[in-house]
Structure formats: structure tokens, C-alpha cells
Image (spheres, coloured by chain):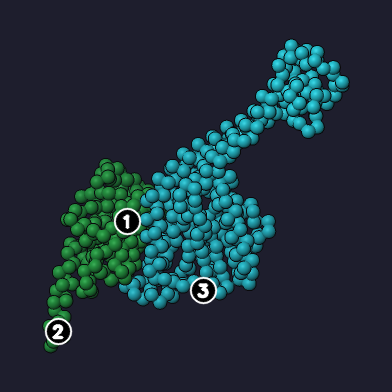
Amino acid sequence: MHPCCGDGLFHVPEIEALLAHASWVRDEHRSAAMLSRTALFVPTCTQVRGMATLKEIRNRLKSVKNVQKITQSMKMVSAAKYARAERELKPSRPYGTGAAAFYDKVDIEQDREKPRHLLVTIGSDRGLCGAMNSNINKLLKNYVKDNADKEIKFVTLGDKARQALYKTHSEYFMMTYSNFGRQPATFSDAAEVAEAVINSGYEFDVGEIYFNEFKSVVSYNLRPLPLHSLESVSEADSLAVYDSLDAEVIRSYQEYQLASVLYACMKETNCSEHSARMTAMDSATKNAGGKALLTCRETQCYCL
Amino acid sequence: MASLVSRVPRLLQAVGRTLAVQATRSYADAAGPVGMSFTFGSPAAAFYNAATNVRQVDVPTFSGDIGILPSHVPTLAVLKPGKLTVYEDDATVNQFVVSSGSVTVNEDSSVQILAEEACRLEDIDPQLARSGLEKAQQQLSAAGTDAERTEAQVALEFHEQVVKALE
């Protein structure tokens, strides 16, 4: 007994149309339906207004299942990358704190009113990793808006920032790095960026590194770390406390510290990216397999 | 006279506290006994993270070999390839081989040593170290451009120090 007939749930001509075009309905059902009611007309198109056809429901079910498979496999890949990134983050955290400790103790003031600013942002190449890159892009846009009278230069790591901003803010971009995030960051990567920043010859007064600090699997937050130029370090008052320093030592020290701080920030970003992607894909899988799937299944059963 | 008398025990105290065998540059201001917060690591491994049980550290730097004790005068230095020795409070001695990096001693007696590469002396294979030294020597003699020569010299110096540390 067809569940739709006699229920009054569906309008009769629509059922006939549906059954007439559902090729997998068994013959006895069709003949039974035909016997019980005379078909008034048989429309030539499959589209019936107000209700999805069985074929469409079937296709939707298939595509939902496919989407689920994709998001689930992306989640597993991200989980593996996250596990490795977290393992490598453990020793690099004290390393980064050690590198930043000198600047904390010396307490060099960055005067934001000074004209030349440098922003280094660390994002990712690929999307689907939560709000990470959009936070950075928003920040860059707002920074430019709030400091319209200053000279600002960006150094961006990760393609997403470039893709979002290059068209409108191309004059601010000094350097951009892509191919970041696929492989775990190494110290030589950080050294390369540090060398490029120093050799660029851009004498900045105020510098900051923005990155997403990894808090836990479900949370990360955008944080700045100060980036000091050689001049501001050499001229700092509290530097006099330090014994036997010459220009050579300060310069080498400064270069190495920059690379170390960048390395620590890169590691944090790697970890944030993979954990964010893992949670995003996890929610996507759950959502795909949730209400949407259930509704499709229910409707399919009804139509049988 | 009184000032001289009061200064003598201070100097003795300062001299007595420099125990390092190598030539030391350090002298301690006779401040109260405050331990040093010691952080030593490389990008790949953190050996000490704000450890307070360290008595002395011998560090090879480009400005000379330094022995750092608590209350060492604040200084910055560039790390040279070589052997780094850590003497802990309970008389254990840990030896490491480091490549380049930075050394920071702050006013509050915290010490941060960041090395680009560092590993325990026990983990070094003497055979590999010696073959590395020979290879570096060959590279230096075969070096063409200035950049190649500098790189080869850096490699050579590093391997020499490693082999020396193993002896």
C-alpha cells in the first residue's frame, strides 16, 4: 500500500506524475495506483512545482554523501598535520619566549606616531581554516585606514593575504611569500624572511609581527609582537646596562633574534592553521550528515 | 683604610665564585644569592626552560669563552660553535655541542642561550664528526667564490670544534 495514497498528504495528480516518471517504481505499484485513480494528465516535464522530484532527491543524497566523504578525509589529513605541528611547537615555544625576553627586559618603547611602519603578517596559503586569514586581512585594512598619514609597508606570508588585498592595496606590499603552510616551517625559512626584511633597506620606526597564537584545538587568537629595528635597539637607554657591547655584536644579535622570533610565530601559525581546519572540517562533516541528510532520507522513504 | 678593609672580602668573594677552568670574563657583584633562570634551546629541542637549578654555564662566544654564574653582569654575546657545559646544583654536568646563536644575560640574572643547532655531546657520533671534518676541509680547498669559501670555513670551524669537544 503506497503510503502517499489515501493519506491526503499529497495532491493526487502530483503523485501520478511522480510515479509515472520514477522509473524504478515496481510495475504492480504503478498499476495499482493506476487502477485506483484515473490519470487526468501526464505532464511531459519532470519538474513539478512545489515538491522536489525523486531523482533530484536521489542526486542530492548522493552529493551530500560525497561532500561528507571529502570533508571527513580533509579532517583526517588536517588532524595528522596538526599532531605533528603541535609536537614541533613544544620546543619552539620556549625558544620564542627566550628570543623575545631580551626585548621585554629592555622595554624599548615603540612610538606609534613615527612615520614609517612595517607589518609582518603570517597567515596561510589555503583556506577552509576558520577565521585565521580573514582576521589578518581585516586587521591590515583597518590599520591602513587608521594610519592613513603614515608610510606603511606589508610583508605577508601566505597567499591568502595577497589574494585578498593586492588589488586594492598594492602600493603597501613590500614582499609576499607563498607556499607557506603546506610543509612545517623550518628555521631556514625564518632566516630567509629575516634576511629579506633586513636587506630590504626599509628603515622603519615602528614594526609589528601579527600571527595567530595557538591557544587550544578550538581557539587561537591574533596577536602582535613588536619588531624592533637596529636603530631603536642601539639607541635604547636600558641598553647601557649591558656590558661590553659593540656595534657588530648588537647587529648580529638583532638579526638572529628576528629570525628566532619569526620562527616561533611561524610554528604557532602552522599549529593554528591545522587545528582550525580540522575543527572546520569536523563541523562540516557533522552538518552535512545532520539535518540535511535526514530530511533527504525521510523524503525518499515517503516517495517510495 | 676602612674602605679598603671592607672591599677585600668582597673581592675574595668575587674571585672565589669564578670556578671555571677556562679563561673567564665574569665577575660577580656581591649582590644577594639569587639563582639564575636558565633557558637553553634550539628550534628543534628545548633543553632548559627557565630552569633554576643551574649553578654555572660555560659558553663559547666570539668575544671569548664565558663562564656565567648567577648575578653575572648583563651582557649580549654571539655564540660560537663549540662545547657548552652546564653545571647543575646537584653536581651533574651536562655537555652540549652548539653551532651559532645568541647569548643573553639580563639584569635579573636570567640567561637565555639560543642556538641554531644544539645536541648533547653523548649523541654525537665521533666517526661522523671526523668524516665531516675531512669533508669540510676538502670543500674549503675546492671552494671557488667568496661565498663558497665562507660557507666552507664555517663548516670547517664547526667540525673542528665538535671533534675537539669529543676529545
For the point 47% across and 62% down, the residue is A225
Residue to which mark 1 is pinned? B49
The chain painted cyan is: A
- The numbered mark 1 sits on a residue in which chain? B
Residue B126 seen: yes
Q: What kind of residue is marked 3? A: Asp
Mark 3 packing: few (<14 Cα in 10 Å), some, or many (20+)? few
Q: Are marks 3 and 1 in contact (CB under 8 Å)?
A: no
Viewer-closest of B31 and B131: B31
Amino acid type for the residue under numbered disc 1: Asn
Q: B158 or A130: which is nearer to us?
A: A130
Determine if residue A59 is in view: no
Residue A53: x %, y % from top left: 75, 27
Q: Amino acid at mark 2?
A: Leu
Give the Cα distance between marks 3 and 2: 47 Å
Q: What is the crowding at mark 2: few (fewer than 14 residues within 10 Å), some, or many (at least 20)? A: few
Q: Quadrant of the N terminus of chain A?
A: top right
Q: Which residue is mark 3?
A: A111
Whether labels 3 and 2 belong to a single chain: the reply is: no
In the rendered image of this protein, does residue B28 appear above or below residue A266? below
Query: Residue A11 occupies which quadrant of the picture?
Result: top right
Q: Position of residue A200 (x, y in %)?
A: 54, 63
**Label 2, label 1: how far apart the Cα atoms are:** 41 Å
Q: Which picture quadrant has residue B83?
A: bottom left
Disc 2 + disc 1, Cβ < 8 Å: no
Q: Quick one: SS at disc 1?
A: strand
**Label 2 lies in what chain?**
B
Query: Subunit of mark 3?
Result: A
Q: Which residue is mark 2?
A: B4
Query: What chain is colored green?
Result: B
Considering depth in this image, is B106 or A134 the residue closer to the camera? A134
Of labels 2 and 1, the one closer to you: 1
